[in-house]
Amino acid sequence: MFRHNLLLIYRNFKRFKSTFFINLIGLSTGLASVLLIYLWVTDEINVDKFHKNDRRLFRVMVNNPRADVVETSTSTQAILAEALKEEIPEIEYSVASLGGPAIDVTLSMEDRHILAKGILAEKDFFTIFSFDLVQGDKNKVLSDKKGIVLSEATAIALFNTTKDVLGKSMQWQFPWGKDEVYVAGIFKNIGTNSSQQFDFALSMDIFKDVVGKESLHWGNFGCNTFVVLKNGANVQDVNNKIVDFVKHKSKGATVTLFLAPYSEYYLHGNYENGKLAGGRIDYVKLFS
């Protein structure tokens, strides 16, 4: 039977060469398109899902009423994370970070200089996010503002190796200044399944030193705040507690807060008048 079918295919090919090739090219193109779309959709829906705290990891969102519209953003105060951790018992971890998107910084080691993208983050950053540290203690690497955590690729670019680089001195140079630091840790290169992409991380205390304590107030926005809820905590109960959190801290404040699942924000990141209104998920549905 198989031989008979091959014979029929060969005869049809001989009789209808042009039609045969058109059908073959069309079928091949269709199958290739389906495969590529499947791979792309699979990648999209799995972005940020790899964090071990995924089910309990949230991003703090801000609703800011302006005239006849409500603007929703991820821009929060640098002092919010610590206040939430202290006053909301359902929150297990809370960190502030700066660098979404990552900040361009010049890193130097002796006469070697590279341009890298980095973030500033508080000490529990590598505890709540599953960016794998291959060297260094995740509970300590961001505790010291003189320490820097490098990706493997960045360490190789600066030191030609990832071995025996902990404790070595180097320099960073931001637009607002420069300083000498030591390598406190090394993390694996971040994959494309992460919406956060950075080459190094520094302590958030650097930012706090630069802006000064007088600038750390409830009217100064610009940072991201991430929280991990305790096991069994109800997110709606937490939302009810934090909705007017800033209003209680700052007289005249009008902004309200709510939590959005961290791993869903990549696909569901568009808000209209304070309400969720799609995002990249629209393209995923379209191509699917």
Image: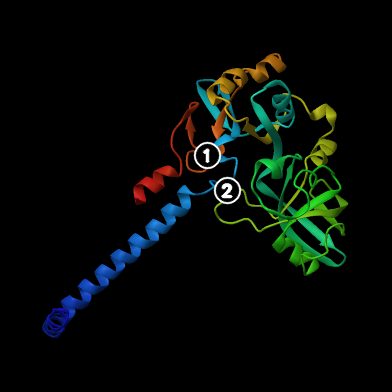
Secondary element under disc 1, as helix, strand or loop, is helix
Q: Mark 2 Cα within 10 Å, few/some/many (few <14, many 20+)?
A: some
Q: Which mark is residue 195?
A: 2
Considering depth in this image, is 4 or 152 the residue closer to the camera? 4
Residue type beneath disc 1? Tyr
State left or right for residue 210 relative to residue 278. Answer: right
Location of residue 24 in the rendering, given as x and y in whole percent from the top left corner: 23, 73
Location of residue 132 in the rendering, given as x and y in whole percent from the top left corner: 67, 53
- Give the image quarter of residue 190: bottom right
Q: CA distance from mark 2 to mark 1?
A: 9 Å
Location of residue 124 in the rendering, given as x and y in whole percent from the top left corner: 73, 39
Asked if the residues shown at circle 2 and circle 1 are in contact, with their CB atoms under 8 angstroms apart, the answer is yes
Secondary element under disc 2, as helix, strand or loop, is loop
Residue under label 1, please give it: 265
Report whether residue 253 is seen. Answer: no
Above or below for 270 versus 236:
below
Residue type beneath disc 2? Ser
